[in-house]
Amino acid sequence: MAHDPPPQIRSMSQVELFWLWGAVLFGLILRLSFPTRMAIEHFDEGVYASNIWFEFNQGGEYPSRHLYAPPLLPMAIEWTMIVASLCGIQPTGFIPMIPCLIAGLATIPSIWWIGRRWFGPSAGIVAAWFVATSDFHACYSRAALTDVPVCLFILWGVYFICQSLQTGTLRHSLLAGLFTGLAWWTKYNGWLPLLIGLFGGMAWQISGPRHERCLRLAATRWLSVAAIAFAIWSPVLWGLQSHGGYSAVAANHRQYVVGFRGWGMAALQQLTNIGLYDNWFSLLTEPWLLPTPQTVETNKTIHQPDRLNKIRVIATPLVFLLVSGVTYASLLIRNWSELRNAGVWTSLAWFAGMSLSTPLYHPYPRLALPWLIGCWIGVALSLQMLRNPRFVLRLDKSGSNALWTPTRVELVVIGWLVVCESTRCGLGTAHAWADRTHVASMGTQIASKIQELTKNSGFPPEESIIYVFGEPAMAFTLKSRGFPLVVPIQHLRFLSSSHPRPVFFVYSDRALKSATFQEELMRHRNDFEIIETQNLKKSPLVLFDDSDTSGNQRINQDIPANVSVWIGRVTRWRVRTSHLHSPSICVRSADLYFLLRNFVLSRSPVQSYNSGLFAIRYFILSRSFLAFESNES
């Protein structure tokens, strides 16, 4: 094909390995410190981590989970919790975060290896330190969300697509399809490696001499990777057919698209989001003007930055954008005909594509992670260009044989990253170390309140029915506190009928944003009584995520740091006539027959997989949770 394959870089020197392991160690400390501050808090976390609490006849997952994400991360969290319970560890706290913590740590050596292969050792080491010291990346690594795992899979998917286009080997094609498929199983935008690889590969081919172009061969190789990735993802698509197909998912995601009309405001908000986490200039500006975990806990509202401080906040992401943009622009203007490095074209497609597409969606901070990784790669490329531009351009392969040692510029950049993040950690203003146990603490208080109210009802407290409106994290917490009859709901129809046991109702300010909910609440205001109201504090991760869904909110608006939670008791329930057995956490024995029967009679691989999975989970849970409960007693 056109252009030369990437040269083989000399084996790592002891100096390079020292700096790599230093980045891994720093990232390890930043992500794993204070594990007791981690707990399920975010709305999506409650959805992804709740598989284990739902029985087979309830679908084995949080209601409508398919609208939020494909099944890979919820499945990984579920089995992590099962293994923890088998070891006698309560599957709450930081346990659901373990898959994301592993993915976050794996990203550090991954981006080093890819940066090293594409551009050289300097780019790899600097990119690894960008990830390791990033408060943004660390914060989401400590959350049970899909964004960090999907970024890891996208990173490797893009790399192997680039390799496949250059070499055409079956191994590279299979690996490219595998990692793209895994990304697609993790998040519905997991097909991004295919798009990045397509445009990067096209640019790489077109930039070469006309007699060396092999567009048809490159397209064939890309299509083979796309076919493998789609084949891996197809069980997810097949499983969606029982929920209205992919069109139902697309319709749900469409409400978060702001389009080009809201592109400017969304881009500015995303820059602010990144700057609120990663601020290189925090030591040079007034830190008390920035939202910190302390101000979150002490104030009723968080004031977003004023105009002067807003510039300081977005300075860091602007540096990322400008340095990356100038680097790529200079390469295109000055070295178009000499640019034979497919990695440069692929990283350019990543940077340009994410810069254009990310602000088309509602500016949730976590959506900026793929964009930020593209910027990190671009900045790392610029530092490698300062060191040996001819090697990046594949004009001089002798540079690949030189042992790497850091230059002064690289030492200054890495040192500044370490000093900034270490200072924030020391002062307690690193968002990654913020306390995220507020929902768990409130769930414990609600559980104690329900036990107190049901003391004289003739029912064991765990047989109470608890309806939770629009708060998956609270539903997760209450189920983990020993209340199996916690029911997530999106309506109030249950208030129209009487119940055979005590019934409670939990909702928050989030529910009051729905006009339908308010109408139903007023219609049934005589069917329940408010027994308690509590204020739920938000961590920075949730705080920065809460904003108007149009994506056009003002950046200087005040964001509530607390949310009110109401606990109601339904007044229409009958006196107990007989003891009603409540379902256990694990699947009941009566379900096992139907599990095995469905496994044999299932017509699709998805149904067969689900039935087999539940059958396996039945045997494990029936032992592990019972053993755990006996140990607790």
Image (cartoon, rainbow, N blue to C red):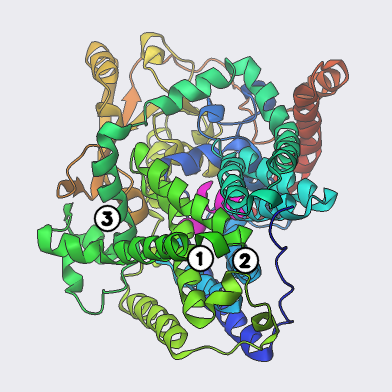
Which residue occupies the extreme left position in the image?
Answer: 307
The residue labelled by disc 3 is 272
The answer to which quarter of the image holds residue 552 is: top left
- Mark 3 Cα-neighbour bin, 10 Å: few <14, some 14–19, many ≥20: many
Q: Are marks 2 and 1 in contact (CB under 8 Å)?
A: no
Magenta segment, principal secondary structure?
helix
Q: Where on the picture, by quarter, is residue 104? A: bottom right
Residue at point 62%, 66% (across, down): 118
Residue 114 appearing in the image: yes
Task: Check if residue 274 falls in the magenta segment.
Answer: no
Measured in 3D between alpha carbons, the distance from the residue under mark 1 to the one under mark 3, in whole angstroms, is 28 Å
SS category of the residue bearing label 2: helix
**The stretch drawn in magenta includes residue 153:** yes
Q: Which residue is mark 1?
A: 35
Dot label at residue 242: none
Q: Quadrant of residue 136?
A: bottom left
Label 2: which residue? 118
User: Which percent across, then down, holds residue 375?
Assistant: 44, 60
Which dot, 2 or 3, sits closer to the camera? 2
Left or right: 578 as drawn, with respect to 30 = right
Please report the residue visible at 23 percent of the width from the left and 43 percent of the height from the top: 265
Indicate the amino acid at tag 1: Pro
Image: magenta residue range: 140-154
Between discs 1 and 3, the one toward the N terminus? 1
- Residue 284 vertical placement versus 379 (above, below): below
Closer mark to the observer between disc 1 and disc 3: 3
| 239 vs 311, nearest the viewer | 311
Instruction: Kindly check if marks 2 and 3 are in contact, taking CB atoms under 8 A apart as contact.
Output: no
Crowding at mark 2 (Cα within 10 Å: few <14, some 14-19, many 20+):
many
Q: Is residue 601 above or below residue 552?
A: above
